[in-house]
Amino acid sequence: MPMGRSALVYDSGSRELILRFKHGDQLHLTPLFSRWLYAAGHDFWADTHLIMPVPLHWRRRFSRRYNQAAVLAQATATIAGLPVDTISLQRQRHTPPQKGHSQASRTANVADAFLVKNATAVTGKNIVLVDDVWTTGATLTACTHVLQACGAKNVRWLTLARVLPKSLQNTYSHIAEEAI
């Protein structure tokens, strides 16, 4: 299982900001989000060779006008002083949005959706895979499998926010109440 980190918990406090960034063209949030991502991945950077975003299919990218994961990856790579590769990992199949689907349905939805166009770019590399929200990990896992199948040495996940599993939601709620 890859190691993963998120800068935020995806909850009522972060949801609005992330959705404005993802769907509302509020790219002015990029510097703030990339600093949070850089801090969350603080111990990843020393041995990372390459940062890669989770790719969007060209149809979805066309409708959104940008890939929010690529924007975050590029800004975070600049802070970390590392190269970013937005081309080698590609989404070869358009998939329906994952929202509202179960873990099994999400996994099936992204099965065989990704490919590596340039295996040489990932062979032997420690890669940090960047996305906006980690829900079940189905998309990140699918990307990780194709990267490793093409020779990536290690793949770690870095996301802006994570949807906590039900088993951790009460723990987080309790910690948040104590902090107030």
Image (cartoon, grey):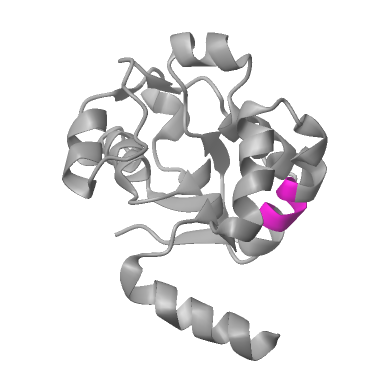
Left or right of 108? Residue 169 is right
Residue 123 x %, y %: 39, 35
Q: Is residue 48 visible?
A: yes
Q: For residue 26, which quarter of the picture?
A: top right
**Quadrant housing residue 175:** bottom right
Residue 86 x/y as whole percent: 56, 24
Q: Nearer the viewer, residue 101 or 80?
A: 101
Q: Say above or below: 96 vs 166.
A: above
Q: Residue at x 68, y 27 (%)?
A: 24
For the N terminus, the image quarter is: bottom left
Where the C terminus falls, by quadrant?
Answer: bottom right
Residue 30 picture location, percent across and down:
76, 39
Q: Position of residue 66 (x, y in %)?
A: 63, 19
115 drawn magenta = no
Residue sitting at 16 percent across and 44 percent down? 104
Query: Is residue 116 or residue 177 the one in the foreground?
Result: 177
Q: Residue at x 37, y 25 (%)?
A: 119
- Residue appearing at x 62%, y 90% in the figure: 178
Q: Nearer the viewer, residue 146 or 65?
A: 65
List the single residue furthest toward the bottom: 178
- Position above or below: 160 against 148: below
**Range shown magenta:** 33-37
* Overall secondary structure of the magenta section: helix
Question: Would you place residue 98 above or below residue 167 in this image?
Answer: above
